[in-house]
Image (cartoon, rainbow, N blue to C red):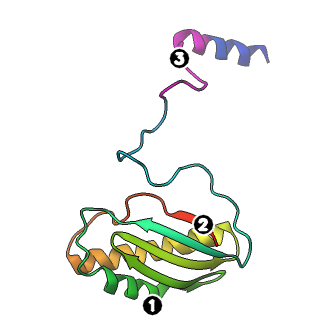
Amino acid sequence: MPNQFMANTKRAKKHPNWGGRRPGAGRKPKGDKPMVSHARRAKVRPGARIEIRWQLDPDIELKGARAALASAMKEGSEGTGFKVAKASLRGRVAEFRVTARDSERLARGMQGLAIRFARALNRMVGRRGRVFVDRYEVREG
């Protein structure tokens, strides 16, 4: 125990700002106004209908977006414990109504759907890079 205490105090003397919370510390938001908080999401009730909104990158051309969404839905709308009941594209916002067995199934299902949608959209538009601006927004409804 004394050795551990000594190591911590020596380290603290070398680096006076080492450890603990500091004002202004941490990763800064990428945009002017981040869309979704990076706080931990609430647990999902099994079988609950969940509404999801996901904002697309403003640099993307939307000419192939509906076809890309249809392609992604055809392949990845249903998985073990995850099902997309409805998907729509309103301007630069993709909206989904899903059901999931639990929070992990929701996360894995949305990851798969996002990858399929992004690859299809990038292929159709002839570009590379990210498609979504930020994390998706979840509301139980």
Q: Which residue is mark 3?
A: 17
- In the rendered image, residue 124, in percent from the top left (x then y), is placed at 24, 81
Residue shown at 32% from the left, 86% from the top: 67
Q: Tell me if residue 46 is in the magenta stretch.
A: no
User: Where 79 falls versus 3 (above or below)?
Assistant: below
Label whose residue precedes the other's in the sequence (3 or 2): 3
Quadrant showing the C terminus: bottom right
- Identify the element where label 2 is drawn: strand
Residue shown at 69% from the left, 12% from the top: 6
- In the rendered image, residue 36, in percent from the top left (x then y), is placed at 49, 54
- Identify the element where label 3 is drawn: loop
Q: Which mark is residue 139?
A: 2
Mark 3–mark 2 Cα distance, whole angstroms, equals: 39 Å
Identity, as a three-letter code, of the amino acid under mark 3: Asn
Q: Tell me if residue 15 is in the magenta stretch.
A: yes
- C-beta proximity under 8 Å, tags 1 and 3: no
Q: Which residue is mark 1?
A: 74
